[in-house]
Amino acid sequence: MDPFVHNIDPFIFRIGDGFGVRWYSIPYMLGMLFVYLSLRKAAAQRRIAGLTEENSESFVIMAIALALVGARFFHVFVFEFDRYGFDPVAWVAVWRGGLAFHGGLLGVVLAVYIFGRQHGIRMYDLTDRIAAPVAVALGFGRIANFINAEMYGTLYDGPFCVDYSQSQYMGAPPEGCRHPVQLYESAKNFVLAGILLGMREKLRPRPGVVTWTFIGGYGVIRFFLMFVREERIVAAGLTLAQFFSAGMAILGAVMLVVVMTTEPPRERTTPGVDGPVQDPGAGESGGAARRRERRQRRGGR
């Protein structure tokens, strides 16, 4: 089978020289839409206390902004600082490409924390809900990486290999046929999204299980896929992204054990109040709960 010769224009359309709308922008718009629709549905069904259709919009805008800042920060200052150096203009030039997943994830986590504090929403209620749509958006993002001819794979002469050497859109196209690792990662994200959605809607596990399954599963699979991606080795035959991915995998496994073995807070539903309300006695010992009840009875006389 002849290799696929990559010569795809990264721009959907151009406005002048070097400006225009890139394919890379589509996943972020889709991600914002998927997350918003998922949260809006949860708000309409009253599945998350404190979440409304209106504040869902605020969360999505905040999450997109912080994800972009985090992704750009990691790309420039963690992965590629030797390339960018002390050039503030280059640091913010996101239209030239360059966003790191790990930084984007931290940006979303920060948005969840801030939004949850503002509206009294537990973090796991939000992260369990958005894990699947975020994975879908990441799947489209890797397709955009393939169109951009970036993050390509190592040398490979098997079926479906990709030849970038004739691309007129790359500054320094690599020689030889390459693994389409971006498409491998895209497939991984779509499969992971299906698993997370099935867990959330069918199994209804404890709060946090869907979240940490996403974190751990993503880290494990990406760690191994990075062996067929062309990237600089930093230590022990591993890339920097592999170290971060291994950290995600370990953290995900540890936290899965924690959330599966820790008794979740009890909830009660109060008539006239939308959604679950935290039981004021949750987390108390039996003796402390009895003392609180006696105080309440004395105060009611």
Image: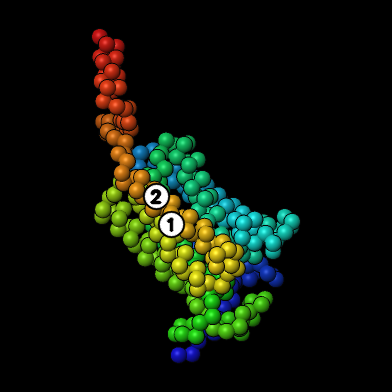
Q: Identify residue type, mark 2.
A: Val
Residue 40: image location, x then y, percent: 38, 49
The residue that disc 1 covers is 249
Name the image quarter holding the N terminus: bottom left
| Residue 29 versus residue 16 in the image, above or below | above
Classify mark 1: residues with Cα within 10 Å, few (<14), some (14-19) or many (20+).
many
Q: Determine the residue positioned at 50% across, 65% down.
A: 141
| Residue 156 versus residue 223 in the image, above or below | below
Mark 1 vs mark 2: which is more N-terminal?
Answer: 1
Residue reaching furthest right?
A: 86
Q: Determine the residue positioned at 48% across, 55% down.
A: 247
Q: CA gap, disc 1 to disc 2?
A: 9 Å
In the rendering, which numbered label is found on residue 254? Answer: 2
Q: Identify residue type, mark 1.
A: Ala
Residue 146 appears anywhere in the view = no
The one of 233 and 60 positioned closer to us in this rendering = 233
Residue 115: image location, x then y, percent: 47, 41
| Residue 285 versus residue 134 in the image, above or below | above
On the rendered structure, is 153 left or right of 48?
right
The one of 214 and 89 positioned closer to us in this rendering = 214
Name the image quarter holding the C terminus: top left
Secondary structure category for the residue under label 1: helix
On the rendered structure, is 272 left or right of 184?
left
Q: Is the Cβ of the residue at disc 1 closer than 8 Å to that at disc 2?
A: no
Residue reaching furthest top?
A: 301
